Image (cartoon, rainbow, N blue to C red):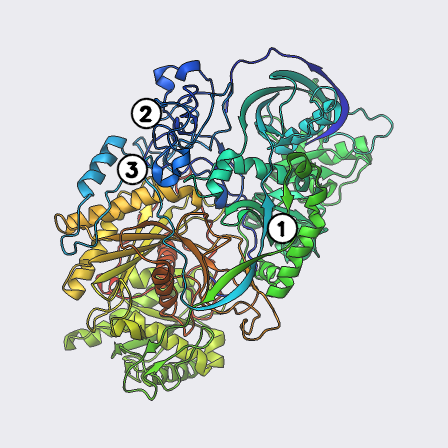
Amino acid sequence: MVKKKRTGSGSTGESSGEASGAPGHGSSQRAERGPQQHGGGRGWVPQQGGRGGGQYQGRGGHYQGRGGQGSHHPGGGPPEYQGRGGPGSHHSGGGPPDYQGRGGSGSHHPGGGPPEYQPRDYQGRGGPRPRGGMPQSYYGGPRGSGGRSVPSGSSRTVPELHQAPHVQYQAPMVSPTPSGAGSSSQPAAEVSSGQVQQQFQQLATRDQSSTSQAIQIAPPSSKSVRFPLRPGKGTYGDRCIVKANHFFAELPDKDLHQYDVSITPEVTSRGVNRAVMFELVTLYRYSHLGGRLPAYDGRKSLYTAGPLPFASRTFEITLQDEEDSLGGGQGTQRRERLFRVVIKFAARADLHHLAMFLAGRQADAPQEALQVLDIVLRELPTTRYSPVGRSFYSPNLGRRQQLGEGLESWRGFYQSIRPTQMGLSLNIDMSSTAFIEPLPVIDFVAQLLNRDISVRPLSDSDRVKIKKALRGVKVEVTHRGNMRRKYRISGLTSQATRELSFPVDDRGTVKTVVQYFLETYGFSIQHTTLPCLQVGNQQRPNYLPMEVCKIVEGQRYSKRLNEKQITALLKVTCQRPQERELDILRTVSHNAYHEDQYAQEFGIKIDERLASVEARVLPPPRLKYHDSGREKDVLPRVGQWNMMNKKMVNGGRVNNWACINFSRNVQDSAARGFCHELAIMCQISGMDFALEPVLPPLTARPEHVERALKARYQDAMNMLRPQGRELDLLIVILPDNNGSLYGDLKRICETDLGLVSQCCLTKHVFKMSKQYLANVALKINVKVGGRNTVLVDALTRRIPLVSDRPTIIFGADVTHPHPGEDSSPSIAAVSAITMKIGQKFYQVTMWLLLKTGLKSLSMLDWELLISFKRATGQKPQRIIFYRDGVSEGQFYQVLLYELDAIRKACASLEPNYQPPVTFVVVQKRHHTRLFANNHNDQRTVDRSGNILPGTVVDSKICHPTEFDFYLCSHAGIQGTSRPAHYHVLWDENKFTADELQTLTNNLCYTYARCTRSVSIVPPAYYAHLAAFRARFYMEPETSDSGSMASGAATSRGLPPGVRSARVAGNVAVRPLPALKENVKRVMFYC
């Protein structure tokens, strides 16, 4: 970062003739997880370029298929640039998945595009002959135009702003192994466009069993794919009005211009770039910029609401380095840095395409136009607050809250412009995240270690912890008065401060650090036994004693939080709906968009009222229980019910079980008593459960977990095997804080012994509440192959498009390593359930280790289809696929790859077997919140003040043309409920809005682990749990997410985008161990 000095000069460069063209249920405000990658197009085919040429066709013959660095050629340009896209720019740290550039289709149709997306008035305009033509190759050049053919009048002398071009395709869930990472092979997910086209052509068949269900021909590339249009809005359910945190944004009537910016010497800091540009605008706005107030993205692009008075110009800007004196003073000389800034015209956009998209006359959103508007509205907040992704934080936006170990929470807000049915809307939400406290380093280390560091020397583990926490942190020195130079920490010295010495002149004079600070600055170092901070590089290291350094304010903590810090952060972020709504309104009022000079410059107007949206409340489904219970079925009330007077519809059998106690606080008698009460509860709930274990409970030490498990299992099998029996269940009592014990236990039981286990925490053993025991009984039942409940409509075959023929419902999710754990792989899991096949219910989950590709995904689908056929005696005739963890920028890639995997799995099962597929993405990591229209009306809210479960919205704030909806299927517990967003990417089953919304809502009442409806469909939830279970097999430490010991806190905590699973350096990734067959057949992860 540099301080600004108001000097500079502008020199006119030559005008350029070129133009160049960015589960919890219920709960809580989400703590911001950090910047997400933003950019790139929604690539659909491996190595495919952007939608080349589409947006520049129909322009009177000019600028057809512009490729390269934006060079345009009159009359269409040379053949190598026609119709070619490109990998597209990639801007890291940009924000949420909502605006990762949607590359799109770029179908090449003469005269303005296909008729289904444009009215007759817009077809065939701009000249009699076709413009552009089909691309010569699917492989893109360096920059692509993006966009589809649009209506046009006369030709233009400069191109318009193009859409974000494609990024080169990578595996949709994990990036390829980089060069030097120990692999010389190509990424497994990469295939040629010809191979993809051939595969899709081979897979395109028609369902022979039904003339009404025609299978769509899967397209060979994204150039011909269109996500399903909305089949109409739903009508089922009780109508109501809700409020959404979307604020109408009036589309400006301005001619927007883009300019490329080059700053030399090049710096990586956006802050420095912004400081340079701010100084340039301050000095030259009225003299050289024609009075324009530009918006700058901090990197390479500048936007104006009208042309600048030049095509290319060079400026020189001088700034003061912030690492020098902040307060001046005698004897101090501020270092100055000279920057050369070149501003060069790139492209122009009149926002016509955005208006067409919002009106439903263009299929794909022009992402770059949206990005321009987003950048404009971010300009002012960026100068006031600390930007993190698409959020802004400040210690002045709310009370700071200490999180422990030197961290504190800052309040802030999320802001993003979105295209919706009501037009453009600004999505505003409250957010909190962790920052490093601006403490003296000595105090930070004391908090980090939770002890007085002057009492005893640091241990090796202490040093590792300090080094990990401080690496990359910026500090300022405090021993030089007003001279507050800033440095970034690169490490710690291996020696104590009193042992460090260094040469001070060319004659080889050596001084100790302690001596140097005393003689030079008159500063006496007190903590001489502590290591020094190391700044600079290894070749020329600089040593700074900890006690002369203070952490600079405003540094976000991007590493993994521990459980206590997560709990503290959630307490801060958790707000009741009414409080959150008021905070959002206060934020909008405080931001004063009507006074924002950047918004005024570009003509953007923001309404300060929450959007009122029509919604419907879907009724809950009736659930079936066993006829032997006093209550044979139940109608949930406000998303919940209980097991009182009910028995599981299919009770499992546990004849042989054992118990191991790893808690030192639980005596043998307490363990026996707890197990006996749990066995009774399982019987009451409808299971066939033996009251006594095959062996008395065993008490063992946690550090001997493997020896204890194997020994007890062998003892039990020595008793049972001669009788032809197996051990059905292991009950395990764990300490409340059990570290890696839980993960080790699950790995050994499920991959080594083939044993299903149920873990219980010590606090629940002592409390032994009936509610807790009932919930554990639900988990045990499905772990041993039972089923807790089923939809009554499934039994009576009244579920549209599901009950009429055998249907398999897939769920898929991917887990990613935590921040800073790049050596860990990403793991995909796929689960599958059937609604009802006679009296047989089947569920199975498989997973896949992701390293460089996803070629084995079709094998997972194949195994699930085989399992379905083996369990039911027939093949599924419909497939519904719910896919979790996909950002909008990944839609095309994920659909391409996973639909292809499904097709291959079906074809492998039987030639010409291609059942119709519906592919639905489930998104939870978004910022849309729904509030009751009247918080005081008890008929429209649940006990937590949230909207009622079953509330569905498919209008106004949803996509202008595509098939999507928001569904709040669960009752809130605390905080503000987050509705799930469902977006249909492929639909051969031709669902109506009511049919898919009702099916999705009803499925949320069938989650096996509790008697509550959940926030996302259970198949996707199960896949999430299974993927996190697999991570225990890879990592010894306890995860913050997934299925934990009963009663332990869980958090979904998944970053929504593609996280690399590549191996750091040459570290080998341990392969996933195989599950034992008897474990694989049941819901062991519940």
Upstream in sequence: badge 2 or badge 1: 2
Quarter occupied by residue 995: bottom left
Residue designated by label 3: 188
As drawn, 744 above or below 222: below
Label 1: how many residues lie within 10 Å, few (<14), some (14-19) or many (20+)? many
Label 2: how many residues lie within 10 Å, few (<14), some (14-19) or many (20+)? many
Whether residue 555 is visible: no
Kind of residue indicated by mark 1? Phe
Residue contact at pointers 2 and 3, CB within 8 angstroms: no
Residue designated by label 1: 413
The outermost residue toward the right is 330
Q: Residue at x 32, y 61 (%)?
A: 748
Q: Residue at x 85, y 25 (%)?
A: 331
Answer with left or right where residue 1003 lies relative to residue 596. Answer: left
As drawn, 385 above or below 725: above
> Which label lies toward us, 3 or 1?
1
Label 1: state its secondary structure. Answer: strand
Q: Position of residue 277 (x, y in %)?
A: 67, 27
Q: Nearer the viewer, residue 480 or 627?
A: 627
Q: Gap in Å between the C-alphas at discs 2 and 3?
A: 26 Å
Residue designated by label 2: 135
Label 3: how many residues lie within 10 Å, few (<14), some (14-19) or many (20+)? some
Q: Position of residue 877 (x, y in %)?
A: 20, 58
Q: Position of residue 254 (x, y in %)?
A: 60, 32
Kind of residue indicated by mark 2? Pro
Upstream in sequence: badge 3 or badge 1: 3
Q: Nearer the viewer, residue 1030 or 648?
A: 648
Quarter occupied by residue 720: bottom left
As drawn, 1042 above or below 547: below
Upstream in sequence: badge 2 or badge 3: 2
Q: Position of residue 672 (x, y in %)?
A: 38, 82
